[in-house]
Image: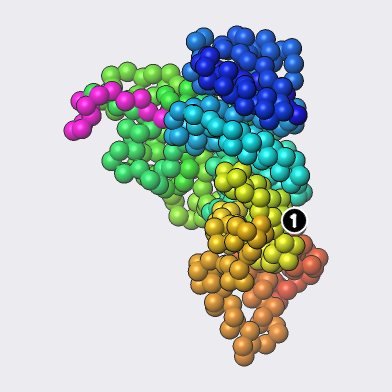
Amino acid sequence: MANVLLVDDDRAFADATSQLLSLLGHAVDVADSVKEAQKHLADGTYDRIFLDLMLPDGSGFHLLDYVPNNSGRTKVTIITGHPSVKKHVMSLYGMNVNYLIKPIDFDQLKRLFEGDERSRDQNVPKKHFGELIGESPVMHRLYGMIQRVASSDANVMLMGERGVGKGVVARAIHNAGRTQGPMVAANCGAFAPELIGSELFGHEKGAFTGAIARKEGLFEQAENGTLFLDEITEMPVTLQPTLLRVLETQMVTRVGGTGPLPVKCRVISATNRTENQIVDSNCLREDIYYRLAVFPIHIPPLRERVEDIPLLVQSFLYELNSENGTAFGIREEDIQKLLSYDWPGNVRELRHTIHRAYIMSNPSDKTLRIPDDFCSPFSRRREAPKQTALVGRTIDEVEKELIMETLRKYNNNKTKAAEVLGVSVKTLYNRLSSYGADNEDKTGKTGS
């Protein structure tokens, strides 16, 4: 039996749903306003809350701040007549909040509570800051950095390969900071060059052809919150001085505007380029780099935290089962397949692999099957040259190539490269000296 709080001002709907819940063996309290629901939450503990969005004295979303922090025990179901709310709910509040579309029937409610039982049986992995999954040492170091920067208002630059989850980390920082405003996200590589100024800073009516009304820019929309600028290195260099001025003065002038407006938000930017690549390509001005990367964070690729793969698979599978009313599991031998792959597409590729396997699996089998050829065509293309790399080459040549490739992979960080290669830093320098490649300081810190 579950303790349920039903919050809805539609009396007929509330009475009918209460009866259905009682038939399922659950204890139900009913509230018809935000104020009454707050009293119930202050007096009792609930396993599930059914919540209407439109209440007489405010939005149902406001009640989410009153739900006790009890390690995910209390689950919230938004009751709505609009299917479009799904993505909004999931992006804001994660897996612990889902939704049902009116009208609700007995079978829907039954499947919902059966899903709760499955999630307890599956031991759904913990989401740090409501977003991040992983218990590996590198992820715990990342959590520590998030916690550290969350207590400040410093701008953050996220660096990492494609698919590592830079947007997810940005949401985690936003959540950890407990900001009052929203998180607003934008992809700088997706804007037309001639419109990016209007998108970021807004425009006044008549500022240019097609500007038929005043528009707030992303900085204004993110007031007292977080502005996430993905692919920041794709922003035109010509526009970067304007962005720099906004970051320095915390004032923005709309395109066609006559005066500056104050703005206040944390800026989290992201790029898949390394620091060396940023410098070499001149894609980001030095002065704006220092403004954006007050606190840089490097997100580890999936191949550096393979021990997190089973947890990620478990979470992805739980989401798919919850959304579709299924109960798929996965075999240990398939987990081993996933562990043996190097995941060049990172977490995004892993999620895609699980989703594809879910679609292809036989529903009556109840077991997810990972095909032998699950790697993507992009991975096969990257791996193809390696298949003939050893043919006709000496051991010394292969060793040199391995060392140089490892250094490139870790941005010339010799301490990290030596650790991965399983040799001492001194041995690594001796090898580099024999190749004529040792022209740097021998402290082991070069490139770190």
Q: Is residue 120 above or below residue 248?
A: below
Magenta highlight on residue 248: no
Residue 61 location (% of width, % of height): 55, 21
Q: Is residue 43 above or below residue 158?
A: above
Which image quadrant for residue 19? top right
Q: Residue furthest left?
A: 209
Residue 67 location (% of width, % of height): 67, 21
Badge 1: residue crowd in 10 Å (few <14, some 14–19, many ≥20) = some
Query: Which is the main secondary structure of the residues drawn in magenta?
Result: loop
Which image quadrant for residue 129? top right
Say which residue appears at 50% left-offset and 51% top-offset: 278
Say which residue appears at 68% left-offset and 24% top-offset: 22
Total count of labels: 1
Say which residue appears at 70% left-offset and 78% top-offset: 399
Q: Is residue 246 left or right of residue 385?
A: left
SS for callout 1: helix
The span shown in magenta is 206-219
Q: Which residue does the numbered mark 1 point to in the structure image?
A: 307
Colour setup of the view:
rainbow
Q: Amino acid at mark 1?
A: Glu
Q: Quadrant of the N terminus?
A: top right
Residue 443 location (% of width, % of height): 75, 57
Q: In the image shown, does 245 or 80 lie closer to the viewer?
A: 80
Q: In the image shown, does 205 or 267 lie closer to the viewer?
A: 205
Q: Is residue 134 left or right of residue 363?
A: right
Residue 313 in view here:
no
Q: Residue furthest bottom?
A: 392
Say which residue appears at 54% left-offset and 36% top-offset: 91
Q: In the image shown, does 435 or 22 lie closer to the viewer?
A: 22
